[in-house]
Amino acid sequence: MKSIGAILTVFLGGLLIYCSMDFPPWGDPDSPANSHVSPYYIEHTLEDTSVPNIVTSVLADYRGYDTMFETIVIFTAGIACIFLLRMFKTVEPETRLYRHLPTGITLRIAKGGKFPDDSDHFKRIDSDWVPHDLILQTTCRMIIPFIQIFALYVIAHGHHSPGGGFQGGVIFGASIILFAIAFDLRSAIKRMGERLTAFLCALGVFIYAGVGLVCMLYGNNFLDYSALADIMGVDPISARSHGILMVEVGVGIVVMAVMVVLYYNLASAGKQDEGL
Amino acid sequence: MDELLTILIARINYWVYIILMMIGMYGIIVKKNLMKKIIGMSILQTAVILFYVSIGAKKNATIPIIEHGHDTGHATAVQAAHFINPLPHVLMLTAIVVAVATLGVALALAIKIYKQYNTLEEDELIEILKE
Amino acid sequence: MIWQIELIILMIVIVLAIGALAVKDLLSAAVLFGAYSFMMCLLWAIMGAVDVAFTEASVGAGVSTVLFVAAVFRTSRRTKD
């Protein structure tokens, strides 16, 4: 098996290297890929959409359909992960571990014992050994608001600098994942529950498709944002710029929610009680 | 010597991408562990993305963001030769995010298989399924 | 772009890819794969694809490494090959 795989791989690699002799030299400005479609995007993006970042304008305006269905693929992946892993019947573990916060003593309570409520004195901890790390938790508590502000900046400033809905959404989701790692999964779920994340997944796709439908109601094509000029009271070119921003917000919400859903389900293997 | 160097510089990028693709494919075909197979799949994916992005590269061109676009953009004409081709960037940007979503589904399947059969090795799985 | 830097990073990328597939501990493989993703991000920044580099830095080196570590934590860490 090993030798067959190696021979197959080397054969394919040799074939590709043989084909690479016909490629244009690396970085050639006149290669076919650089000389047919893309000059139109580069030269007309400012007069069409008034967005300096060409990648953003192509992503959300010229190729809006493409991005919409990519968003739906991400949404479907999140739903598939829930269906594969989530176990709705909760099986109570044999024993639970609690930490007495003022003294730092760990209590092990077997099944049938009386579980204390979560309060200022007792806190449930995971069954794998988790030290109480004050430095880590305080640092994360301080740093997470700034990460989230940066994520919102990346979404809102994607017109003028690298960034946009995908990157900002991932950074926002990563801040919530950081919270879940530094504290524990239960306190993260208490703040951002399963219902909310599933709702946000759907809401982002709804915003994206809804913007397109509003354009259609005003008599233009699907996702032709210049129809929004009447609602916003700006000229059609600025309306396209604002339409791109609305779509990016939708993309950001989907990506953020799906990242959080994936982490919750993978880290707890679907039980959503004890995490990483 | 100089000619050889220019040919090497013009081609060596493509060869490195092909080597990366070969590493990823070898991982998918030969490695028995499912997690290793997923890592190999991701390497193959990034190699293809790297190839696409390098198609759009241009010499003596800058990043595809037009400088001071809002203030003076309409007055000065934008020349296509001065900016890197943005089209592969757009396609591959969405491909990366979709890749991480599908990676999540693949890992979910791996966890499900481990729960059911208590192993991730392919040959042991085949043994269990034969019984 | 400076081709010497690019060549060095390409070599590092190949070494990390082989390492991620060859190492026998899956947690190390996950971390090496994160390093591989980050080197890939540097490569794209050199090529001028800033948006792609930004996405890879947040997605590939950030979230996908965390997902790998979470999955290794829930399954086994050892492997035979």
Image (cartoon, rainbow, N blue to C red):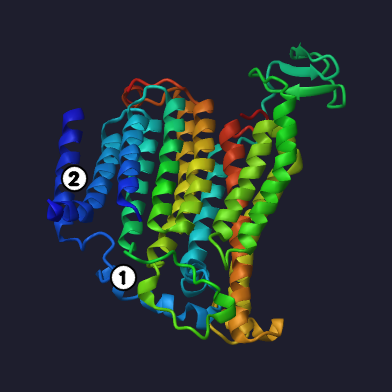
Q: How crowded is mark 1: few (under 14 residues within 10 Å), some or many (20 or more)?
A: many
- Assign a secondary structure to mark 2: helix
Residue C37, given in percent of the width and then of the height, sits at 43, 42
Is B3 rendered above or below residue B109? below
- Assign a secondary structure to mark 1: helix
Left or right: residue A103 versus residue A73 is right
Residue C79, given in percent of the width and then of the height, sits at 38, 22
Q: Are marks 1 and 2 on the same chain?
A: yes
Q: Quadrant of residue C63?
A: top right
Q: Distance between the residues labelled 1 and 2?
A: 26 Å
Disc 2: which residue: A13
Instruction: Note whether residue A217 is visible.
Output: no
Give the residue type at disc 2.
Gly
Left or right: residue A101 versus residue A50 is right
Residue A197, given in percent of the width and then of the height, sits at 67, 49
Give the residue type at disc 1.
Asn
Disc 1: which residue: A34
